[in-house]
Image (tube, rainbow, N blue to C red):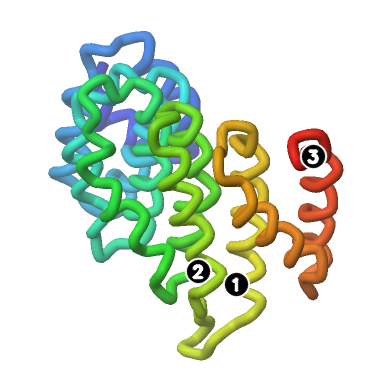
Amino acid sequence: MDLHKKLLQKGIEIESVADDVIASPDSIPQLFELFYSKKGTIRFRCEKIIRLISEERPEIIYPYFDKIASLLESDNNILKWGAITIISNLASVDAENKFEKIFNKYFTPITKKQMITASNIVKNSWKIAMAKPSLVEKISIELLKAEKTAYENKGEPSPECNSIVYGNAIDSFSKFYGKIKNKKPVLDFIKRQVNNTRSAVSKRAEKFIQKHNEEMI
C-alpha cells in the first residue's frame, strides 16, 4: 500500500485509510515514517490515522509508545493533544508499564493555564484509570488539581474555561468512580459543581449524584 500517495489525495476519508492500515499492519512502519518525515497536512493526517487505529487496535500502535510520548512536549498543540488521546488508548495494552514512567509528564499540564490541553488530559484519563487500577487514586488526585488551577483565555483568568475542565472531570470520574477508594474528595468536588454557573456542568454534577447515589451511601 502506498500510504504517501493515498494521503496526498483530495477528499481523503481518514477512517477508510485507517481501516486499510488495520487490514495491512505491515504498513504501520510506513505510517510512522511519514508521520515523522513529513510536515503540514500529511503529518496531521497521519496523526489522525494513528489516533483512530489506537482506538480499534492499540496493540499494533503500542510498539511506538515512546515516540508518541515524546509529543507530549511538542510545541505543536494539535500533535500534543493527539498524543494525549493516543496514549490513553494504549494504556489497555501497556504490558511494559511504560505509562507509569511518564505519569507526571502526562498529568502536569492540568496545573498549567492552557484549558484545551488540560481538558484533553482530563477527559481521556478514565481510560487509563480503567486499564490501570493501581493508578486510580493517583489519577483522582491529579484531576482534582483542576479546581485549584486558573485557566486562561487570551491571557486572562477565565472561570468559563475552568468550568469546561470541571465538566470533563465529572464525566471521567463518573466512568471510574466505583474503583476509587477515597471517594470523599471526589464527591465534595462534584457537589460543589451542582452550583456551577455553567448549566451544562451543574446538570452533569446532578446526573452524577443521581447515578452514583448507592455508591455514596
Is residue 125 visible to us here? yes
Where 74 falls versus 83 (above or below)?
Answer: below
User: Which label lies toward us, 2 or 1?
Assistant: 1
Q: Amino acid at mark 1?
A: Asn
Q: Amino acid at mark 3?
A: Ile
Q: Are marks 2 and 1 in contact (CB under 8 Å)?
A: yes
Which residue was labeled with disc 1?
A: 162
Q: Amino acid at mark 2?
A: Met
Which residue was labeled with disc 3?
A: 217
Is residue 79 visible to us here? no
Which residue was labeled with disc 2?
A: 115
Residue 4 is situated, as x and y percent measured from the top left of the image, at 24, 32
Q: Earlier in the sequence, mark 3 or mark 1?
A: 1
Name which quarter of the figure residue 35 lies in: top left
Cα gap from disc 2 to disc 1, whole angstroms: 7 Å
Residue 92 is situated, as x and y percent measured from the top left of the image, at 40, 24
Q: Earlier in the sequence, mark 2 or mark 3?
A: 2
